[in-house]
Amino acid sequence: MAPYTGWLSAAETSCTVGAYLKNVADLEPLVRFVEEAAEMPEPTVGLTVSPMPPFLLKGIDLQTKLCELDYKIVCSLKDDSRKPTSVVAEELGVSAKTVRRRLTRMVNNFLVMFSIDWYPDASNDIISAFHVQLKPDAAPNAPNIIWQKHYPNILFYWGFSNMPNTYIFFTWNPTAKELRETRESLEREQSVQTVSPNIIYTGYIFNTWLDDIP
């Protein structure tokens, strides 16, 4: 089962914490820790049951499992996802064709994702988190329609199972003028009730229990 993902934020601060949880039982101690460490007495907690936005999971077999070879491939690529498949194959004693086939299967089923440790303060572009509240009568696919309409300025979005019609849209803009245009465009959407943009100026990435799995 996919891990739970929690987002915690407070209206009077610009601090947002994202966390991967093994199960819901881990949420309460995490909230207490954030309240104390970040001095956020009343954080808003949003839950999504998957680390991937729902529009990306359409048609994906969530019962697909990783085998022992898959874990070995992931472990080989864990600290260098650009490592050639031929090198991975040599390390594991299998053919490069086998490595490519297993990787393709994992990627297509979102069992593995390639990423980098990226920090917004190292970029000249403007990355923002738009907290968007949709109207109560908004269509279920409204967030996906908004994302497709504004892509690539909207990179991806998150919804929350415990907060209906509440979403965070992560946006990219090269200039402040385009950031304003993105906000105004979102405010004009028929399904949107309120828009609250927050520019991300710094961020931190920490290891989690997921890093120990391979």
Image (cartoon, helix red, strand yellow):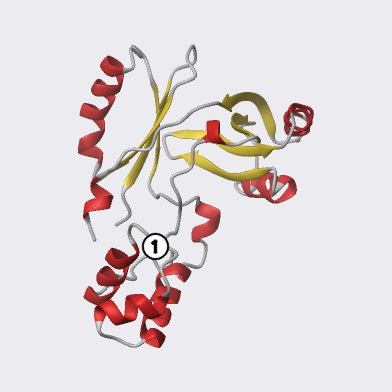
Horizontal relation, residue 135 to residue 61: left or right: right
Residue 15: image x %, image y %? Answer: 44, 22
Q: Looking at the image, which residue is at 33% across and 17% down?
A: 38
Q: Quadrant of the N terminus?
A: bottom left
> In this view of the protein, can residue 54 be seen by the observer?
yes
Which quadrant, please, contains the C terminus? Answer: bottom left
Q: Quadrant of residue 205?
A: top left
Residue pointed to by mark 1: 112
- Does residue 166 appear in this view? no
Q: Front-most of 189 and 75?
A: 75
Q: Nearer the viewer, residue 115 or 91?
A: 91
Q: For the point 35% across and 64% down, which residue is it?
A: 77
**Where in the figure is residue 89, as x and y percent of width and height?**
33, 81
- How many dots with numbers? 1
Going by the numbered disc 1, the residue's amino acid type is Val
69 or 28: which is nearer to us? 69
Q: Residue at left 60%, top 26%? A: 199
32 relative position to 136: left or right: left
Q: From the top left corner, tell me how far across and down residue 93 is, in percent.
A: 25, 84
| Helix, strand or loop for disc 1 | loop
Q: Residues within 10 Å of mark 1 (few under 14, many from 20)?
A: some
User: Which residue is nearer to you in this view: 212 or 58?
Assistant: 212
33 with respect to 51 (left or right) = left
Q: Position of residue 125 (x, y in %)?
A: 66, 36
Quarter where residue 186 is shown: top right
Residue at position x 70%, y 48% from top?
151
Above or below residue 80? Residue 150 is: above
